[in-house]
Structures are given as structure tokens and as C-alpha cells.
Image (spheres, rainbow, N blue to C red):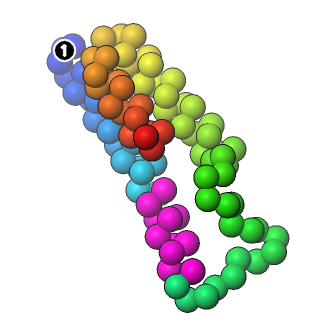
Amino acid sequence: MPGLLRGVARTAVVAGTATAVSNRVSRRQQGRWAAQQGYQEPAAQPAPPAGAAPAASDMSSNLEQLKQLGDLRAQGVLTEAEFEDQKRKLLGN
């Protein structure tokens, strides 16, 4: 049973990380396409400058995922190396 729980938990972490990365790639690609077409963002929603802090919703989502990763590591579901790898992917480092 612990092996099954570990597999399910690992799958959940990977799926959550994949979703976050996919969303980030989509936003980045959309910005590149807009720049190639000369599209200007509306004044009400300016694009954040490069290197700016992530939006509050992204930050809270990342924080929640980091907490989940920490809980899984504390429960022994993830090893320290797996935790560090997932954390690095989540934070984009």
C-alpha cells in the first residue's frame, strides 16, 4: 500500500508541475507571437517587464505546490533529491 500511495503522490506532483510549466510556456509563446505581429497590449493590462515578480495568483499557486511538495517529503513519499528537482522545476531555476 505505501508503494501505491507513493506512486499516486508522485504522479500528482508531476502533473501539477507539468500544468504550471505548460501554462508558463503558453503565456511566454503568446507574448512572442504578439511581439512578432506588432500587437500592443491594452493600456489597462500592460505586459509585465522581463524579470518582474510573478503575479499574485501564480505566486500563491507556486507556494501551495511547494507546501505540497514539502508535505510529501516529510511523509517520506519523495526523497530529498526528488523534492529538490521538483522545487527547481517549479521555481524555474
Helix, strand or loop at label 1? It is: loop
Residue 67 x, y percent position in the rendering:
51, 23
79 falls in the magenta region: no
Work out whether 53 lies above or below 10.
below
67 in relation to 32, above or below: above
**Residue 25 shown in magenta:** yes
In screen coordinates, is 14 left or right of 31?
left
Residue appearing at x 61%, y 52% in the figure: 51
Q: Which residues are magenta?
A: 24-35
Residue 27 point in image, percent of width and height:
52, 64
Is 14 on the left or on the right of 57, as rendered? left
Q: Is residue 64 above or below residue 48?
A: above
Quadrant where the image shows the C terminus: top left
- Residue, x 74% and y 68% (percent of image)? 46
In the image, taking residue 13 as reference, residue 7 lies left or right, namely: left
Q: Quadrant of residue 34?
A: bottom right
The residue under the point 32% across, 31% down is: 85
Q: Position of residue 73 (x, y in %)?
A: 36, 16
Dot 1: within a 10 Å radius of its alpha carbon, few (fewer than 14), some, or many (20 or more) residues? Answer: few
Dividing the picture into quadrants, the one containing residue 61 is top right
Quarter that holds the N terminus: top left
Residue type indicated by callout 1: Met
Q: Quadrant of residue 72?
A: top left
**Which residue lies at the image location 41% right of the left edge and 56% below the top edge?**
22
Inspect this view and state whether residue 16 appears.
no
Q: Main secondary structure of the magenta part?
A: helix
Determine if residue 23 is in view.
yes
Farthest bottom residue in view: 37
Disc 1: which residue = 1
